[in-house]
Amino acid sequence: MRGPKSVDVKLKLPGVEIAGSWEPNDAERRAAWELYVELITRVSVVPLRADEGLLREALSSLYSLFGTTRDVLRRHGPEIAEPKRNGQYNFGYLAVAMLNYGVRPLLAQWHPLLEDWEHRRPADRSRRDHEHAWPQVDELRTALRDARRILTSYADLLATACGVPNLLEAVPTADR
């Protein structure tokens, strides 16, 4: 797999900023490609318009990134997390940091709040109508947009490491 020898890393996550360089090896590029494909085909980076989908589905999609990332880390083994010289980053560190700083705080805050609201849904109201009536719906949509920006930056980093063009250009840009 082709890609640049070195990739500049600049990710601003809630609570931490990651800046430096990454010299991905072939195993890291393969792992980066797998995770890149997962990211760009999910609500995590594909915009969810106000009249589309359910917020629960967006949160579930973000939650599934934990399992997907664990699978990628296990499948590619320690080679993708080996310490690099001069404090350079490796795929393992970048993947775990993205989950723990970019996704986990959002899920920890919003999953239980939305779940509480969902349990109050009257039997004669659709899930969608009930969710749209939630007083915090706009706040969660804003939080999802913020997370999308972070994950899009991460996806861009992975694409660069793999030496591929930004495939998100194939996605409508209304909410990006």
Image (cartoon, rainbow, N blue to C red):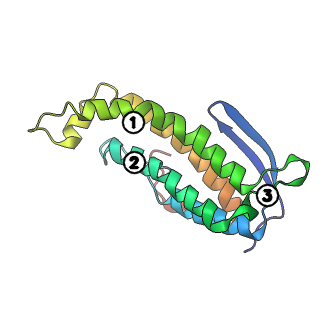
Is disc 3 placed on a helix, strand or loop? Answer: loop
Real-space Cα distance between discs 2 and 1?
9 Å
Q: Name the side, left or right, on which 112 lies relative to 155.
A: left
Answer yes or no: do the residues labelled 2 and 3 have beta carbons within 8 Å?
A: no
Where is residue 154? Give x, y as percent: 63, 50
Q: Amino acid at mark 1?
A: His
Report the residue at 46% width, 47% height from top. 63
Classify residue 47 as left or right of residue 9: left
Report the amino acid beneath label 2. Ser
What amino acid is labelled 3 in the image? Glu
Residue 111 is tagged as: 1
Q: Quadrant of the N terminus?
A: bottom right
Q: Nearer the viewer, residue 64 or 175?
A: 64
Relative to 165, is 140 above or below?
above
**Whole-number angstrom distance, CA of label 1 to CA of label 3:** 33 Å
| Distance Cα–Cα, label 2 vs label 3 | 31 Å
Mark 2 or mark 3, whichever is nearer to me: 3
Residue drawn 36% across the image and 29% down it: 113
Circle 3 residue: 82
> Mark 2 sits on what residue?
60
